[in-house]
Image (cartoon, rainbow, N blue to C red):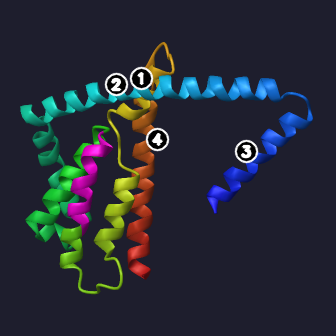
Amino acid sequence: MINYIWFIMIFCGVIFGIFTGKGEILSKGIVLAAGDTVELVIGIMGLMCMWCGVMKIAEKSGLMDKIASLLRPILKLLFKDASKDPKALGAIVMNLTANMMGLSNAATPFGIKAMEEMDRLNVDKERASNDMVLFLVLNAACIQFIPSTVISIRAAAGSTNPGMIIVPAIIATGCAAIVGVTVCKIFQRYF
């Protein structure tokens, strides 16, 4: 459906540009936008490689393990069934730790593994367990201490201070995580 909406918007824009006599301006705009997009993507790729390297260093140095050990007691309180299974809890911890460091690419395999482990523990295979729903909410609204993707985009777009987003990101993602967990826990009582 979204493809149709985009097609209609682009088609109407091109037709409007041609009928108003601004076809040349439209074609120049398309070419410039395409060039700017390529430039932005190349800039983001370089910065993402740098952040992935920094995170790999954090992982090899044991920083990720220290963060994970801090998270374990909190997650044992939040997850009923998964907290009793070391494999499930380990995958949850690694996913959330990678997300907190802004490495959603690295977090994805751990997230898939965590869902597989929680599905193994799930009694009713037709429905997601409360732990699975809570994990999904925490995965989507995870507190980010280093929002590396946003920093990379801001740097590639020419921001004078791309790291200025760190404190607002911590506040916003912290609020989102608290609200998400609270709503999940309330709904768990009724559903």
Q: Quadrant of the N terminus?
A: bottom right
Q: Which of marks 1 and 4 precedes in the sequence?
A: 1
C-alpha separation, residue under disc 3 versus residue under disc 2: 31 Å
Q: Quadrant of residue 67?
A: top left
Q: Residue at x 92, y 33 (%)?
A: 20
Label 2 with label 1: CB-CB less than 8 Å: yes
Query: Relative to 52, is 8 on the left or the right?
Result: right
Query: Which secondary structure dominates the residues rendered in magenta?
Result: helix
- Label placed on residue 43: 1
User: Dot 2: what SS?
Assistant: helix
Q: Residue at x 22, y 63 (%)?
A: 114
C-alpha separation, residue under disc 2 versus residue under disc 4: 23 Å
- Check residue 108 for magenta coloring: yes
Query: On the image, numbered disc 2 is attached to which residue?
Result: 47
Q: Amino acid at mark 1?
A: Gly
- Label placed on residue 172: 4
Q: Residue at x 22, y 69 (%)?
A: 116
Range covered by the magenta-colored residues: 103-115
Label 4 with label 3: CB-CB less than 8 Å: no
